[in-house]
Image (tube, rainbow, N blue to C red):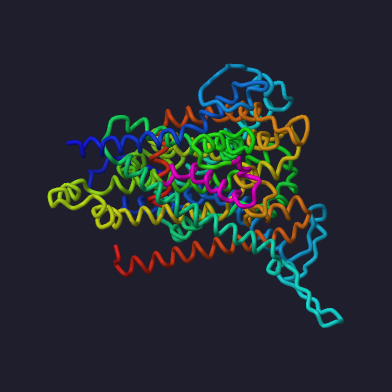
Amino acid sequence: MAWFYAKRTAFYLLVIAIVVESVFPFYYAILTSFKSGTSLFQVDYWPTQISWDNYAAVFQNGSFPQNLLNSVVVATLTVALALLFAITAAYALSRVRFRGRGILLLTILSVSMFPQIAVLAGLFEVIRTFGLFNTVWGLIFSYTIFTLPFTVWVLTTFMRDLPIEIEEAAIVDGAGPWVIITRVFLPLMWPALVTTGLLAFIAAWNEFLFALTFTSSNSTRTVPVAIALLSGASQFEIPWGTIMAASVIVTVPLVVLVLIFQRKIISGLTAGGVKG
Amino acid sequence: MTTESTAPLPGTLTVPQIAIKSELLTSRTRAAMWFLVPMMVALAVVAGWPLLRTIYFSFTNASLSHLDAAQFIGFNNYLHWTTLKSGKVLWSGVLADPAWWNAVWNTLRFAVISVVLETIIGTIVALVLNADFVGRGIVRAAILVPWAIPTIVSAKMWGWMLNDQFGIVNDLLMKLHLIDHKIAWTANADTAMTAVLVVDIWKTTPFMALLILAGLQMVPKDIYEATAIDGVHPIKVFFRVTLPLIRPALMVAVIFRLLDAMRIFDLIYVLTPNSAQTKTMSVISRENLIDFDKFAYGSAESTLLFLTIAIMTILYIWLGRVNLAGGDR
């Protein structure tokens, strides 16, 4: 019996270790963001003060509200674009037989394996040629490289599993492909669309390399770049308080979204991984 | 589109119906082609063409401000040698650049260590989540937190926690008497890579754990019941029964993570900037491309990274085929 309780205790200690280790860094960032002045440089494990100074500083600090808006616009439009292209492509890839379908799917999957740096030089030229450099459009355009292959892949596997009878009934009723997609499949695909849309949103929201390279002014940057480049009055004075406040602001919406949709996200992640 | 006016009996096909059906099929195929066009054009413009241009630039002397005036110079960016009058041979180009080989070494070191540790810890977390216990939902939600946090934010958070003077990590380790002086984790040459590994493992283990958990949940429960009746030791059960069964899922997760780790950029760029001990192939490529205005040289480096990852992917697919044919599973 004692042995049983010892094992139980050890198991729960492991569980607690996993939870604490996962959550602590974010907890500590929140803790730091509510400190001001000299107390910032004193290590505390529990909340000692609640001061909104850092949050006020973040929003008064010139371009941060603009950066936040840029991130929202870029991530939203990236998702919309990826879903629009992916739904039509997934219909063709999953429901219609044609030669070269397997090769095409493999090519799409391999694009998602691309190192972003490999296209950076060429994409830089394309973006400059189109006059998209230092605009949010350049980012939305370039983000399709990692959102589109993944979205197409997951939606294709999802659509393939939908019963063929529904589509046949629609064809008998005289529905064309476009009507079948928008009226028949779309209503059935909400779960898959929410999952892929959410994952694409998170990917676009977090992206750093393209955002760093294809923008050059404070007003067009997205939040990850803005946070990475936040600097204090002098080069040696890093404004940890405001950095932590900004970090909490950009992370809280994501954490809330992820916790609300956790089941869908887990199924989406494993569908992209295990089936791929 | 033409449709029939008379309702046919279900399950029977008359001759005109077959004609209509094949007509429907061709019109469907044609429509499908049009549906593929937007996606294919988008991928060509955003991935295919830029990749070709990057490879092209690597054979030129292009610079950031003079992309149009680029001239073809062959393999000079990759490897080039000149023989001096004294008979001494001077090598130049990426393949003769110690900084490049240092980056290759850093990348491989980072990728192998991080993926091995993430797989081990991820398996442990997955085994915990696969057990039945009170509060499992909370644990699953908790491990999603590191995954949800943007990489840049985790780099900054950990940068603050690992701060030499005011960081909580040094404070904790001092209180536990594990270290006797404060360590500058991110700035110190000996510990910079460790710092990067810690943050990366913290951030990506959840992803591994969830993929492995999906594999674990496909293992039928009665196998465990059988081993329990036979009184097999749990550790033996894991290595002899569970591990072989989840190996396919595990392999996919490992390959995904490995390819991802090979191209790491943002964490290192933010956590340990300017540290030669952590500069990876992606970091050094971007540095040359943009910061040092050696556009063509950087293109050559990113082409080499692309080739490395492409070869790894092809090897994996090829080995995977062989494995399937051998009926190993």
Give the residue at x 38% y 35%: B140
Answer with the quarter of the image where residue B266 lies.
top right
Q: Main secondary structure of the magenta part?
A: helix
Instruction: Locate residue A63, reporting x and y percent.
Output: 72, 27
Left or right: A94, with B148 as reference point: left
Instruction: Locate residue A40, reporting x and y percent.
Output: 63, 25
Give the residue at x 68% y 21%: A37
Left or right: B121, with B11 as reference point: right
Position of residue A179 relative to residue B58, above or below, is: above
Identify the image quadrant of the C terminus of chain B. bottom left
Q: Provide the residue span drawn in magenta.
A: B181-208
Instruction: Locate residue A136, reporting x and y percent.
Output: 68, 36
Q: Looking at the picture, tell me which residue is in the foreground, B274 or A107.
A: B274
Q: Could you tell me if residue A89 is visible in this image?
A: yes
Position of residue B213 relative to residue B71, above or below, is: above
Identify the image quadrant of the N terminus of chain B. top left
Left or right: A128, with A41 as reference point: right
